[in-house]
Amino acid sequence: MEKRIDGHTGLLALFGTPVGHSGSPAMYNFCFQHDGLNLAYMAFDVDIPDMEQTLSTVKLWNLRGGNFTMPCKNIAAELMDELSDASKIIGACNVFVNKDGKLYGDVTDGKGFIKNLSVNGIEIKGKKLVVLGAGGAATAIEVQAALDGAAEIAIFNRDDEFYARAEGTVEKLKKETPDVKVSVTKLEESDKLAEAVNNCDILINATSVGMKPMDGQSLIDTSLLRKDLVVADTVYNPEKTQLILDAEEAGCAAAIGGKGMLLWQGALNYELFVGKEMPVEEYQAFQAEQAK
Ligand code: NAD
């Protein structure tokens, strides 16, 4: 790595907090090196109040692009010079590129999540979904699933500051994708949650529950995990959340963790950064080697 870095190296970075657990720097740096690109990727621990200064610095130091993670994805969208259509609907962005001093933001979480399902043999079109969550990842998945033709999307979120966002998402989707049946219900209404899970094809956890320090926790009672249910999680740290472990034990049709979502949204981001496909197979082989 140190042999690659010189006075011309272009910098990209991840912004948010916490970022120490992120796999993004290792992934992009591997791919830059593999593709012979004079670029480097870092992670910076910044919070919402730091974002204005952060993005001024991005311009001042001419960073080439990068990513935003929680809790900075919404404020990032407000601070971009230009946004993709998906980012405008969602009001968030997880990736940006610097186009001659103008920052262009997009959102690839939803597309990456759905690509990961597809790679695992699960198609979203015509399916009934229960999505737990109304934050950045959840909203991106809900919007993308609606755009990709899901039949029903039942959103459940606890009665916190994110609930109103879910109501906003439902309103927007009713307008943008009128054929999709969308609803939002409080997570605390456990009878309604049970009924929705019993009637859905795909159950998705897009909350932070299951992620450290909430590892070992799941929002879904194991009695709801049946054999023809597909279960997917956005959380990738730990790789297998309690929900995924429970789904595996219950013999669910599929139990798909968040690592693949990270990989595939990363691959979409890579294309945005450098204009070519990410060497996904080579990166996966590298990861497998590192894990030994
Ligand atoms: P966010 O802060 O925007 O949203 C957090 C969500 O979790 C909200 O809906 C909130 O209501 C819910 N929540 C938090 N604590 C809860 C609790 N105790 N009980 C019930 N609900 C609770 O976060 P985000 O960016 O949407 O990220 C959510 C999760 O998705 C994180 O674990 C993150 O690591 C993961 N994620 C994964 C990828 C990936 O590529 N795999 C990408 C983005 C986010």
Image: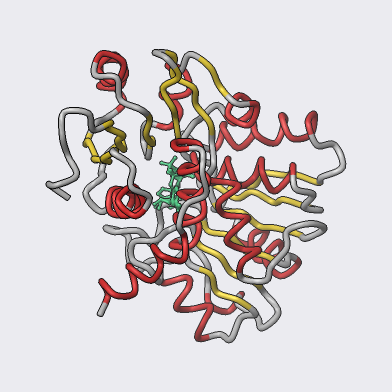
Residue 292 in the image, given as x and y percentages of width and height: 25, 80
Residue at (38, 71) in percent of width and height: 285
Q: Nearer the viewer, residue 138 or 11?
A: 11
Q: Position of residue 124 (x, y in %)?
A: 73, 58
Answer whether residue 159 is visible to the viewer in this image: no
- Residue 15 x/y as whole percent: 30, 34
Quick one: which residue is furthest to the left in this view? Answer: 2
Q: Classify residue 146 by image quadrant.
A: top right
Residue drawn 44% across the image and 29% down it: 96
Coloring basis for residues: secondary structure
Foreground: 242 or 1? 1
x and y, in percent, of residue 186 in the image = 59, 47
Left or right of 156 in this view: 261: left
Image point (61%, 24%), residue name: 88
Name the outermost residue toward the front.
36
The residue sitting at 76% across, 59% down in the picture is: 128
- Note whether 63 is above or below 15 in the view shown: above
From the viewer's side, name the closer residue of 230 and 87: 87
Q: In the image, is residue 223 above or below residue 217?
A: below
Q: Is residue 241 left or right of residue 146?
A: left
Q: Is residue 218 visible?
A: yes
> In screen coordinates, is 151 left or right of 265?
right
Number of callouts in the render? 0
In terms of image quadrants, where is residue 213?
bottom left
Q: Nearer the viewer, residue 81 or 180?
A: 81
